[in-house]
Image (cartoon, rainbow, N blue to C red):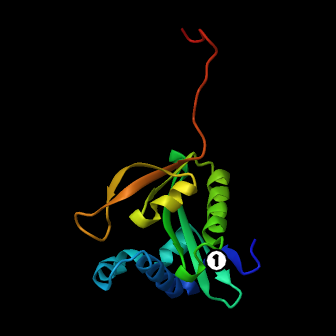
Amino acid sequence: MSDDFTIRKAKLTDKDSLTDLSMRSKQSNGYDDAFMAQCVEELRVRASWIEDHDFWVAEAQDGKLVGCIRLSMEPAMRSGELETCFVDPDWKGKGVGRQLFDRLFARAVSGGLSRVGVDSDPEAEPFYARMGFRTIGRSPSGSIPGRTLPRMELILARDIEEKPNGAGD
């Protein structure tokens, strides 16, 4: 753990700060104000996200939220979805994303998941690839009609049923 920030569960009182963080981080990918206006509703953090999902924040020593990550899980399907992942532009490259991902990976494994998917921002695709995700297709944007996003997947465990040679023949 870094001495500059700590990772903790998100609280309902973080909701507005998390929305601001998400907007700042998204815009740092080079998007203009008109594009960002179309994303406001999709990026607005809801209380249900904090109450119903595994949602963690990176908090700086001064109390500022500098990163967040959210995992929803479908245990019966052994799959999860990386729903939210943002790092404050001033904190990129300082280990925030890596530590948030470490928390997400640990929770996914402890939850028995075999895979985690994400609809990635195109600018975040290289970061997710470094975290072990691979691009498997395209998904429609939730904000911009006609825009598609890289669909990525992380395989945590393979469900392989191995049989000795000749068994079951």
Question: Mark 1: which amino acid?
Answer: Ala
Q: Residue at x 66, y 89 (%)?
A: 63
Tell me if 21 is positioned left or right of 36 in this view. Answer: right
Quarter holding the N terminus? bottom right
Tell me if 2 is positioned left or right of 65 in this view. Answer: right
From the viewer's perspective, is residue 43 above or below residue 52? below
Residue closer to the observer: 1 or 92: 92
State the image coordinates of residue 106 (x, y, percent, origin top left): 67, 57
Q: Is residue 67 visible?
A: yes
State the image coordinates of residue 154 (x, y, percent, origin top left): 53, 50
- The answer to which quarter of the image holds residue 36 is bottom left
Check disc 1 and report its element: helix, strand or loop.
strand
Q: Residue at x 32, y 85 (%)?
A: 33
From the viewer's perspective, is residue 117 above or below residue 24? above
Task: Look at mark 1 in the image and give the residue it sits on.
Answer: 58
Q: Residue furthest bottom?
A: 62
Q: Is residue 121 visible?
A: no
Quarter holding the C terminus? top right
Q: What is the tally of numbered marks visible in this picture? A: 1
Tell me if 165 is positioned left or right of 83 in this view. Answer: right
From the viewer's perspective, is residue 23 above or below residue 77? below
- The answer to which quarter of the image holds residue 55 is bottom right
**Local crowd at mark 1 within 10 Å, few (<14), some, or many (≥20)?**
many
Q: Residue at x 65, y 82 (%)?
A: 59
State the image coordinates of residue 81 (x, y, percent, origin top left): 49, 58
State the image coordinates of residue 73 (x, y, percent, origin top left): 53, 57
- The answer to which quarter of the image holds residue 39 is bottom left
Residue closer to the observer: 112 or 122: 122
Q: Residue at x 27, y 70 (%)?
A: 144
